Each structure stands twice: as structure tokens, then as C-alpha cells.
Amino acid sequence: MEISINEVQKMTSPNPFALITSGTGEKSNIMALSWWTFVSNKPPMMAICLSKKGYTHELIDETGEFGFHLIGNEYQEMAMKCGRCSGRNTDKVKEFGFLLQDADVIGTKLIDRYKIALECKVVSSMEASDHWLYIAEIVKIHSGNTGEQLFAWEGYRYLDTITNVQESR
Ligand SMILES: Cc1cc2nc3c(=O)[nH]c(=O)nc-3n(C[C@H](O)[C@H](O)[C@H](O)COP(=O)(O)O)c2cc1C
């Protein structure tokens, strides 16, 4: 039996969910991301996969940097909104009420609350058909104190914690 790649992506979720910050100053943007992985320990590096249709890859190409955040469930609604509209025509920071703070090393700001925030500098990018793959060095690691980690379930369909989903089953 043959099935679609979308069905496979539903079967392989949940994926640990992240918010990416990109751009600087008034052009700061936030997007929802579940296609990411670590790729090296020394130095620490990660990869993120961004749709060509989105705005985030344009901002990352301008600066060569991004902020990566693992976030708690207090951001459940705001985070989902970041995955449903584009920074090209929506100021997600202002409209959804995010607060940003300066990073230590990169010029892109970080979200004020997180479980983990990584400051990342792009070292290479590769075209992958309808996406761009970015490989970045993690130049600073921050640990914070927020709620329970959010996961993306059934592909991109909804966000929730492992505990909530287990309890509702
Ligand atoms: C749960 C969830 C996970 C997502 N993961 C990704 C992803 O890994 N890569 C991607 O390109 N888009 C992903 N998206 C879609 C983008 O967040 C969405 O297209 C967003 O509007 C892009 O914003 P931008 O145009 O401001 O960059 C995801 C959306 C949701 C809701």
C-alpha cells in the first residue's frame, strides 16, 4: 500500500516544537518550526528546514543568524498563530503580544521566556526542492524556566504537551 508523505509525517509526529526568531529591530519575526535536528556536538550545530514560501529564510539570509527556542505550554496559542501567518504581512511580535530581549552574541532578538534558547549563526545552506536547509553553529546556549515542552502533533495540526495528550486518550 502506498501512502502520502503527509501521512508519513503524521505517523512520525509528535515533533519537539520550536519558535525561531529572525531579522533585527522593527523587522523581527517569529515562526513556528518542527523540522529541525541537532547535527554536531563539537562545535554544537543544528539544522533547520524552512519553506521557500515563508518570510523567515529571507530574513535569515540578510543577517546569517537566528534564535531558536524550545518553549513551554503557556505559549500554546501564540505559538500556533506564528505558524498560521507570515511576517511578510503581519507583525507577529506586536499582534500576538510577544516580548523580545537582546541576545548575547547575535543581533537577532530572543523571546523573553523559554525552556532553552539557542543563539545560532548560519554556516551553510542548501536548496532542498521546496525548502531551504540551513546548518548553523550554536554560539550560545540559554536555559530558562517555563512550562511543559510543546510538541507538534499529527504533522502541523496542533500543539500540546505529551502529558495533556496522554491524559486525553
Ligand atoms: C506546528 C507547526 C510546525 C511548523 N513547522 C515548520 C517547519 O519546520 N518548517 C517550515 O518551513 N514551516 C513550518 N511551519 C509553517 C510556518 O510556521 C508557517 O508557514 C509560517 O507562516 C511561516 O512564517 P514566516 O512567513 O513569517 O516565515 C509550521 C507550522 C506549524 C503550525
Image: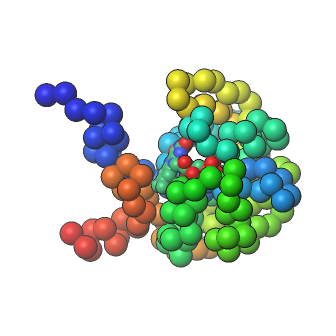
**Count of residue discs:** 0
**Quadrant the C terminus occupies:** bottom left
Q: Is there any visible trace of residue 89 in the rendered image? A: yes
User: Which residue is painted at 28% across and 33% down in the image?
Assistant: 4
| Colouring rule applied to residues | rainbow
Residue 112, given in percent of the width and then of the height, sits at 72, 70
Quadrant in the rendering for residue 46: top right
Report if residue 41 is visible in the image: no
Q: Is residue 168 left or right of residue 74?
A: left
Q: Position of residue 73 (x, y in %)?
A: 49, 72
* Residue 144 in the image: above or below residue 128: below
| Residue visible at 51% across and 71% down in the picture | 77
Which residue in the rendered view is the most extreme toward the left?
1
Picture residue at 47% right of the left edge, 63% below the top: 150
Task: Say which of 59 and 65 sits in front.
Answer: 59
Residue 7 falls in which quadrant of the image? top left
> Could you tell me which quadrant the N terminus lies in?
top left
Q: Residue at x 80, y 54 (%)?
A: 27
